[in-house]
Structure formats: C-alpha cells, structure tokens
Image (tube, rainbow, N blue to C red):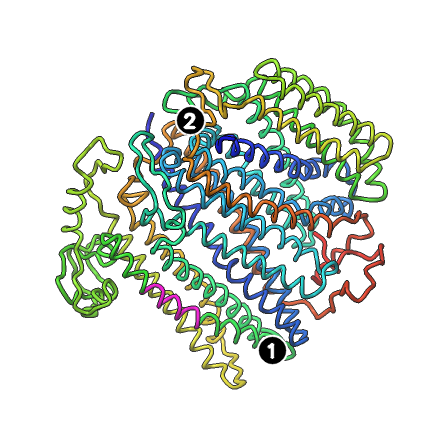
Amino acid sequence: MDSILDIARWQFGITTVYHFLFVPLTIGLTLLVAVMETLWLRTKDPDWLRLTKFFGKLMLINFAIGVVTGIVQEFQFGMNWSDYSRFVGDVFGAPLAVEALLAFFLESTFLGLWIFGWDKLPRGLHAGCMWLVHLGTLASSWFILAANSWMQHPVGYKYNPDTGRAELTDFAAVMFNKVQLVTFPHVILAAYMTAAAFVLGVSAWLYVRRSEGDRPMYRRGIRLGAWVALVAGLGVAISGDFQGKVMTEVQPMKMAAAEALYETEDSCAPFSIFTVGTPDGKSEKFAVTVPCLLSFLATGSFDGKVEGINDLRAEYQEKYGQDPGARYYDPSGNYSPIIPVTYWTFRYMIGLGMAGAFFAALILFLTRKGRTPTSKWFGRMAVATPLVVLLANSAGWIFTEMGRQPWVVFGLMTTANGDSPGVSPTEAWISLVTLTLLYGGLAVIEVGLILRTIKKGPDAFEEPPDPTLGGSDDEDRPLAFAY
Amino acid sequence: MELTTVWFILIAVLWIGYFTLEGFDFGVGMLLPVLARDDRERRTMINTIGPVWDGNEVWLLTAGGATFAAFPEWYATLFSGFYLPLLLILVALIVRGLAFEYRHQRPEAAWHSWWDRAIIVGSYVPAFLWGVAFANIVRGVPIDETKDFTGTIFTLLNPVGLLGGLVTLFLFLTHGAMFVALKTDGDIRHRARALSVKLGLVAAVVAVVFLVWAQVHTGNAGSAVLFVVAALALVGGIAAAYGGREGWGFLGTFVCIGLAVAGLFVALFPDVMPSSTDPAFSLTTTNAAATAYTLKVMTVVAAIFTPIVLCYQAWTYWIFRKRISVHHIPDAELEGAH
C-alpha cells in the first residue's frame, strides 16, 4: 500500500496552524477578560463591565473554534500517525491524558458557569470562574508543550529494543525538560501579546469611529492592550533568546537552518536580515547582514562558534545513518530541513513580532497623558498590530516544527516512519479534503461573526443581577443569559 | 490488582461517563425538530444542555487521551482502523459544538435554522456511529500480526455493527427525551415524557437483541448480570416516565446506558480489541499496554484529580438544576444586551 506520509503531513500542518490561530487569542483573552471583570469589581466602573462582556463575547466566538478543532488534534495522532503513536505512546500519551483531566474539564466546566452564571453566582465567584478558565488554558499549554518539547529533545525515556518503542523512565524529566522550560514562557507570553494586541486593535478601531461619549472606555482598552502587548512582547524576545541558545545546544541543525548557514563559522557568525538569491540560500546576490549577531543568538557570545549545515549533516549521517534497518534511519540521508522554509519563517517570526511590539510602544506614546489621536493612520496601525502578531505566532510554530525535520522525535524516529501503514491514500485524501474545506468554511463564518460583533461594539451598561442581594427567588424571571 | 486491569477499568469508566452524559445531550440535539414547535421551544431545549454539553464532551477527550497513554497500541489500532467513521464523528462534533455557541449570535431565522440542522445532524451521526464502533470492537475486526487493522469501512458496516448503531441511537434518543422531561416545564415537558415512553420501548427491543447477541458471542457471568440489570433499569425508567416520575425515568436510562457499557467491557476483558483474523493477534490489556511506570504515574494523577473533577462537575449541575420553560428564554432583541 502506498504511503500516506505527504497527505498526513499536509493535514497535520493545515489543521495545526489553523488550530493555533485561535489558541493564543483564547489563552490571552481569558486572562484579559478576567482582569477586566476584576477591575470592574474593584472600581465599580461600568466601562470595565461593558468591556468584560464585549471581549468576553469575542473570546467565546474564538474559544468555540479552538475547542472543536482541538478534538481533531487529539484524534489525528492515532488516525494518521499510528506507528508514531505506538512508538511514543508510553511517553507522549501521558501528558495528553493529564491535559484532558486537569485542563479540559476545568476550562469547559467553568466557562459554562461563566457564560450562564451571571444571575446564579456571587460576583466574586463569577470572576473567579474566568480566572479558573485561564488557569485551565495555562495547564493545557503546559502539558501539550511538554509533549512537544519531548519531540524536540527527548528526555526521561529509554528505548526498549524488545517492544521497539520509547518507554518513560522519568515523568518529572519530561515535565521539566529544559526545552519545555524555555518554550512555555515563550509561547504563553506570545499568546498574551496576541490577545493584548487584539484588545488594542479592536478598541482603537471603535475609538476612531465611535461617538465621543464612549471614548474614555475605548481608551482604557487601548492602553491596557498596548501595555500588556509591549511588556509581553519584551518577554517574548527575552524568552526567545534563551530558547535560541537551548535550541543550538540540542538541535544545532535547526539553528544552522534558521540562518541557511552551510559552512561552520568558528567565530563572529553574521545574521542576515534578508537575502536575495537562490531559495535554499546557497548563493546570495545581495544580503543585509549584522556582523556576529548569529553567534550571539546561538551561543550568547559574539565570537561563539556556530556549526554549519554541511558539517552537521556529515555528523548526523555518521551518528544516525549507519544502519538502514534502524527505525531512525532516514533513507534520503539528508538530515536537514527545507532550508528556505526555516530561513524565512525564522525571519517572519522575529520581524513581525518586533513590528507588533513597536506598534504597541508607538500607540502608548501617541495616547500618552490623555492625548487622543483620531487619524486614519492611527486606526490602521492599531488594526494591523494583532494581525502581524498572529502571523508571527504561526511563523514561529512552522519554523520550530519544520526545523525539526526529518525527525518527528529528534534523533529517535523520522517522520517518514511515523504514519499509519493501515490507512489508504484514498482515506487520507478524504480526510485532508474534508477537514480543509470544513475549516475554510468555518473561517469565513468565524471572521464574519467577529467583525459583526466588533462593529456592533459593547452594549450599554446594565447592572447584572446579584444573587447575593436576593431576588433570585423570582422563579419566572428570564435567564440572565441564554443561547 | 494489575495496573493494566486498573486502567482497563478506568477507561471503561471514562466511556461510561461519556455515554451517560453526552448521550442525553446527543438526544436533546436529535429531538430538536421533534419536540420543539417554535424557535422559543428550540431555545428552551438547547438551554437545558447549554452550560454542560462541553464538559460532557471532555469525557471523550479524556477517554481518548487515557487510551493513548495507558494502551498506546489500542489507541493506534482503533483510531487508524476506524478511520472514516471517526472522521465523520469529528466533523459532526465540530459543527455541533460550534452551533451551540454561534446559533444565538445573529437574529436571522435562516441563520438559526442552519445551525439547528448542524445540531440535529451533528447529534445523529455520533449517536449512531459510536454504537457501530463499539459493536465492532466487541465483535472483533480483522487485525494482523503487526496490530494493524486490515479491513475497510465496509468491514465495519456489518449487521451487528449496524444493530449496535441503532442501540446507541435509540438509547440516546430516549435518554434525551427523559432529560428534556426532567429539565423543562410546560407543554414541552409533557410531550417529552410521552415520547420518552415510546422511544424507550423501541430502544428496549433493539438493546435486548443486541445485548443477547453480545452475551452469546463473548459474554461471561459478570456481563450477564450487568446486561440483565441494565435492561431492568431501562424498563423501570420507562415505567417511571409513564407514571410521571421524570427523575426516576432519567435515572433509569442513565443506569441502563452505564451498565450496558460496563457489561460490554466486562465481556471484552482481557481483550481490548479482539482480532477476527487470528485470536493470537488480538490486542489485550497486557500486549497493548504502556509500561508499569507510566501506568503508575497516571494512576497517581488520576487518583488525585478525578475526585476534584467529579466534585466541580456535579456542582455545575447543581447550579443549573432548575427547570427551564419558554418564559425563561429572553427575547432575541433583549439577548443582544449580553
């Protein structure tokens, strides 16, 4: 039977990048909505409640897609990657199971309570529900990133030749993998930055277009969003710098591929901002480079040595390519990822992320001390901010996953060995086409709903019923919220 | 007790949780065009499960994750083998889940009716296909010496598989009608109760035929007891509903579904996926299992967190315990205020 490898890889790429458009917004918005509701409780300022409900609604529209596309993520390991699942299940399955038990129940239950509980829960408890949902998103991120970090840098396991699989020996080592310790802050801070940029962009768009009366409220959204986006953005840069050094240590090929560095540089390796030349970077016609920056990114020292693709390839062939019978043998003998993809996604990640942080800083400056810019350009820049940050998220994930290739688990199993031998290409095509069309249709509906909700803007203030003040014994009162 | 046996039981518990809970919200979805006569009644029905359906569905995700972790070979064989039915279930769960959240976002009647269709079809498809899948697991499917499924979609669509599909379909329809009768008030409550009796009788017939087949095919003393009590619970539930005792009626279908699933797992043990090609190729609780270390870690986590999850999930049902009737549903215009 023909291999479904390429079909399964496209499906994983499409469904995962799509899923992760909604995830960072959700992680960050649950935090910001919890903050807004808490600020309302503290200050009694009605604007905070209006913002809570408005951004809460936008968060829910996002959350719904994140949840349902997440089911596909859990199922497709078994459906398209059954040999991978057999090989890693002993190590990789545990974080997924724990994620469902610790995080998914928490998120879904307390989100239901938050949506429907306005007239049933005391106010503090209601806000607490959103904090618990946020805690659930953090727990979920922790476990799924631990699973992914294990694929980047397998630890706490032993290869068992009798069962032919990787077996867990140290759960704590998997949970506190050094790759995990730098990846988690990077991903979470990027999620905060994304959602904050979203709050900033939406608030500014309404601010420029709406009547004077509501401007103080939108201004709050702008300032909160811009501050969080800027601070989180700096955190993303710092954690990303740590991550680069760990990556160079455990996956030197990925760092070499990020720069399309073919020959080893013994010291002061330059970093190219962009290059004009052949797509694989082997011959460049024109490049803007910063001297020694790659050495600093990779090693923390401007005269550090950075290994090149050619040396690493020879090294990997020596190490992994000796035995064509081994499951970690790559028949192509290549051991390097697709260089144009890693080269450009690395630059898009950094460049778009920095643009987002710069916009946030500029918007903070433009709105300082009560200043009220209303120009079209201000609005356009604010709306562009969440979009560039969202794209930076996608680029980062495409970089880190494509940069690991040809491995699915680094040094242990190549992607080519992980697909399902029992699934026919016809079945895999049906799945790929069905999910792609479905996801495309849902994107149109989702974006339409988001835009519609934004255009409508926050509803007028209405004091929510407080069950602790009595009145909840009125059996015939309509529900505070209903589908 | 062997840890592999403990995890076999825990996975059975997760599926029992999934079918007893999501079973009624599938039922509510399927009955939407039958029980509700106008938009306000449809919204009444949807709101009975609004706060809880997502939490119910997490039981499936936990069952999937736990199978991956505790029995990787079972997870790999099952999910790659039952490929197209699972794809259909995924599509159904996606459109259904979105429908609950998106339906109320716009006022147009056409928008509502599209999402209603998504809820209805999205509930019918998994309600039927989960039964097909479980009947085939119990019946045995072609599995080769490398533990890979060698059949096709048509292998699964055999008479026993289809019968299994009808069993879950009618049990969930009955369960859903019982739930609506328990959670609503007014006309719709009475309609739901009357319908639950009729649906229950059909469910009883198909369920008994299927359970007798399962007992003869692979049963043991334990499964026989569980199947008999499950059948009695269903009959008791129908009688209670007929007599106007909605709480007991719902408890009846709840216990029936739970014990029937438990019985199927007892009948399977120690296999988890018998091979119809050669019994030597069957996946069992031992040859499909993770290592003792992984199972130990997972046991500790499950022992600590399962009680906590059960507490807060029960609490949320308590918070939303009141019956809902049409006059509790806010007007569509007013709803925009939230």
Q: Are marks 2 and 1 in contact (CB under 8 Å)?
A: no
User: Given the image, what chain letter belongs to the residue carrying mark 1?
Assistant: A
Is A467 on the left-hand or right-hand side of A185?
right
User: Given the image, what chain letter belongs to the residue carrying mark 2?
Assistant: B
* Circle 2 Cα neighbour tier, 10 Å, few/some/many (<14 / 14–19 / ≥20): some
Residue B218 in which image quadrant: top right
Query: Residue A201: which numbered mark, if any?
Result: none
* Circle 1 Cα neighbour tier, 10 Å, few/some/many (<14 / 14–19 / ≥20): some
As measured in the structure, the alpha-carbon distance from the residue carrying label 2 to the one carrying label 1 is 65 Å
**Residue A264 vertical position relative to residue B68 in the rendered view, above or below:** below
- The region drawn magenta spans A231-241
- What residue is shown with label 1? A215
Q: Secondary structure at mark 2?
A: loop
Quarter of the image for the N terminus of chain A: give it. Answer: top left
Q: Amino acid at mark 2?
A: Asn
Answer whether residue A235 is magenta in the image. Answer: yes
In the displayed image of the protein, which residue is found farthest to the front?
B1
- What residue is shown with label 2? B287
Query: Which label lies toward us, 2 or 1?
Result: 2
Residue B208 in which image quadrant: top right
Answer whether residue B132 is magenta in the image. Answer: no
Q: Amino acid at mark 1?
A: Arg
**Residue B125 vertical position relative to residue A51 in the rendered view, above or below:** above
Front residue (pair A365, B305): B305
Residue A458 drawn at (x, y percent) = 64, 67
Q: Which residue is located at x 57 percent, y 32 percent?
A: B12
